Image (spheres, rainbow, N blue to C red):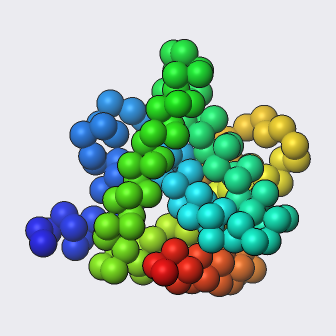
Amino acid sequence: MNWKSTLIPPLIAAMLAPAAAQESRLAGQALHCSAILAVFAQTHAGEPKLAARFNKAVGIFDEVYAKERGGDAASAMREAGTRRADLLAEFRAKLAEREAYLREDGVVCGAWAEGFLGQGENWSYVPVYPKVIGAGIRADYEKLAAESFARWKQ
């Protein structure tokens, strides 16, 4: 284990990865949150309303990534799916040592997703990436993150 794996939070590490070096910070954050919310969607598949909400958030984060990346939209969306799958594989491989960080990322990404989802069916602006999270949202997503990553381990 090196200093990067112990001191750099997963979101920042993802942004420092070679593939992320050529993309904007916003694109990296959106891709990371797409993967986190995909875990939530997978682990709550038996709860249709919740799974649909999380899948919608995954789609929004993919769109944000694609728009920020620029170029051909269809190609960017395919790349988002591929990169999300890579992140999920990385999360799974490091789950035992990084679960606490992933849970906290779940809280932050969930709060950010709420900013998009609160805009209704079609989002029109990118909310500010959350630095301060309200107590209610934090409590909701701490519970969801704990449940999701516990289920995902199995």
Within the image, what quadrant is residue 2 found in? bottom left
Q: Report the front residue among 131 and 26.
A: 26
Question: Does residue 143 lie above or below 28 as drawn?
Answer: below
Within the image, what quadrant is residue 22 found in? top left
Which residue is at a point 54% across and 46% down the rendered structure image?
A: 30
| For residue 125, side relative to residue 34 (left or right) | right
Which residue is at a point 68% across and 43% down the rendered structure image?
A: 60
Q: Report the front residue among 43 and 66.
A: 43
Q: Number of marks in the image?
A: 0
Q: Report the front residue among 31 and 132.
A: 31
Point out the image quarter for the N terminus: bottom left
- Relative image position of residue 116 (x, y in whole percent): 74, 49
Question: Does residue 72 lie above or below 151 as drawn?
Answer: above
| For residue 108, side relative to residue 84 (left or right) | right
Residue located farthest toward the right when viewing the structure as drawn: 120
- Relative image position of residue 21 (x, y in whole percent): 29, 37
| For residue 29, side relative to residue 110 (left or right) | left
Which residue is at a point 67% across and 43% down the rendered structure image?
A: 59
Regarding residue 12, the answer to whether it shows in the image is: no
Which residue is at a point 35% across and 52% down the rendered structure image?
A: 14
- Relative image position of residue 108 (x, y in whole percent): 57, 66
Question: Does residue 35 lie above or below 75 as drawn?
Answer: below
Residue located farthest toward the top when viewing the structure as drawn: 72
- Relative image position of residue 11 (x, y in whole percent): 40, 58
Q: Report the front residue among 134 and 53.
A: 53
Within the image, what quadrant is residue 24 found in? top left
Residue located farthest toward the left when viewing the structure as drawn: 2
Regarding residue 74, the answer to whether it shows in the image is: yes
